[in-house]
Image: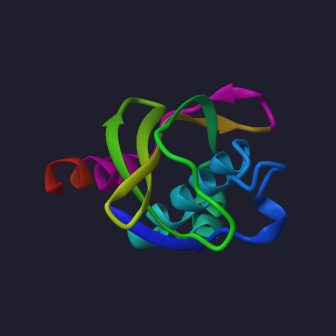
Amino acid sequence: MTAYQHRVRYHEADAQGYLFNARYLELADVAMTEFFRALGWPYADLVAGGIDPSVVSAALTFSKPARFDDLLDITARCIRVGTSSFGLDVHVARGADVIATIQLVYVNVDAAAATSRPLPDSLAQALRSTITAQ
């Protein structure tokens, strides 16, 4: 499981003073990037290796609101690895309070051909190793 912290900035809040709902996907995107960095695959290395993970499904559950200046802990963990896809669970928390959970499915794509492509074995193995280690 990989974690990073995010402080809610003023421009991320909506008219009610809450972290705007679309911003949670931005947090999840950073979580994915940090997850791969901790796995030894910085995002630039992924792309250079022909790996282009694209979100094909996102499910968000909001439990409590986050507000301006809240310090959030965001964690990501891999929950599934397929031939060309993988799933990540992202949790957003403020201390002991769960703010939101985000389930994401990524597919490795060949951007030029606009089709999926298998995950390289080395990356698939690295992803699988995090599932058993959790």
Task: Identify the residue shown where x is 60% and y is 61%.
Answer: 30
Is any part of residue 40 visible from this angle? no
Which quadrant of the figure contains the N terminus? bottom left
Q: Is residue 29 above or below residue 110?
A: below
Residue 126 lies left or right of residue 54; in this view the side is left
At horizontal 74% and vertical 56% (from top left) the residue drawn is 17
> How was the colour assigned to the protein in this rendering?
rainbow
Q: Which quadrant of the figure has residue 60?
A: top right
Q: In the image, which residues are magenta?
A: 112-128
How far from the left and from the top, in percent, is residue 122? 36, 54
* Residue 11, image quadrant: bottom right
Total numbered labels: 0
Height in image: 48 above or below 123?
Answer: below
What x and y, as percent, mark residue 63?
A: 46, 40
In the image, taking residue 82 as reference, residue 64 lies left or right, namely right
Q: Is residue 106 visible?
A: yes
Query: Does the magenta segment cover residue 123?
Result: yes
Task: Depth check: give the residue in front, 60 or 30.
Answer: 60
Q: Quadrant of the C terminus?
A: bottom left
Magenta-span inclusion, residue 30: no
Asked which quadrant contains residue 86, the reply is: top left
Give me the residue at 31% from left, 39% from top: 79
Q: As rendered, which of 108 and 74 lies closer to the eye?
A: 74
Task: Judge whether 101 appears above or below 59 on screen.
Answer: below
Could you tell me residue 109's position as x and y percent? 65, 36
- Residue 88 percent location from the top left of the image: 42, 43
Q: Residue furthest front?
A: 16
